[in-house]
Amino acid sequence: NGSMPDRLKALRDTGLIDYVAMDVKSSPEGYALATGVEIDINKYKESVDILRQSGVDHEFRTTAVKGIHTPADFEKIGQWLQGCEHYYIQRFVDSGNLLDKGDAFDEDEMRDLLSIIKKYIPHAQLRGQN
C-alpha cells in the first residue's frame, strides 16, 4: 500500500521481486477519507517514486468508491501518476460489511473516471466491469 518506502527499497535492492502492485487509495488530499486514518502522504509519494525509478515492472490501482472518491480525486491521481505504464481503476464490490459510506460507481460513471485518468495515463484501464 506504499506506507513503508524503506521496506520497498530493501525489497527492490534484493533483486528478488519482478512485479509490484501498489494500491493508490485516493488523491493525496483524499487519502485520510479513503483510509479512515491520518497518514503521512509523503511516504506514499516516496513509494510511488521508488517504483517508477526501480526498473521493476509495476502497476498502480485504485478501487473507486462512490461516497469516498469524486471525479476531482481521479484528476489529481492522474496528475500524480502521470505517465506511468500500468494504472487500473477497480470497481468496488460491497460484500456487506466493508464500508458504511460507500457504493459502487455504475458502468457509465466508471468510464467517465477512466476518461479523466486517460488524459494523464493513456494506457489506463478498468477492472471489474460487468
Image (cartoon, grey):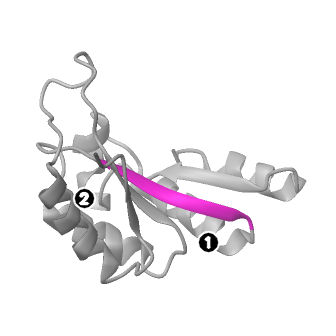
Q: Which mark is residue 29?
A: 2
Judged from the image, the secondary structure of the residue bearing numbered disc 2 is helix
Which one is in front, 49 or 43?
A: 49
Which one is in front, 23 or 106?
A: 106
Q: Which residues are magenta?
A: 56-63
Q: Which mark is residue 81?
A: none
Q: For marks 1 and 2, give the one nearer the viewer.
A: 1
Q: In the rendered structure, does residue 58 fall within the stretch colored magenta?
A: yes
Give the position of the C terminus as an image quadrant.
top left
Q: Residues within 10 Å of mark 2 (few under 14, many from 20)?
A: few
Asked if residue 42 is positioned above or below residue 65 in the image, the reply reads below
Judged from the image, the secondary structure of the residue bearing numbered disc 1 is helix
Residue 88 in the image: x percent, y percent?
42, 59
Identity of the residue furthest to the top in this view: 97
Which one is in front, 98 or 47?
A: 98
The type of residue carrying mark 2 is Glu
Q: Which residue is mark 1?
A: 52
* Residue at the image position 69 percent from the left and 64 percent from the top: 57
Q: Main secondary structure of the magenta part?
A: strand
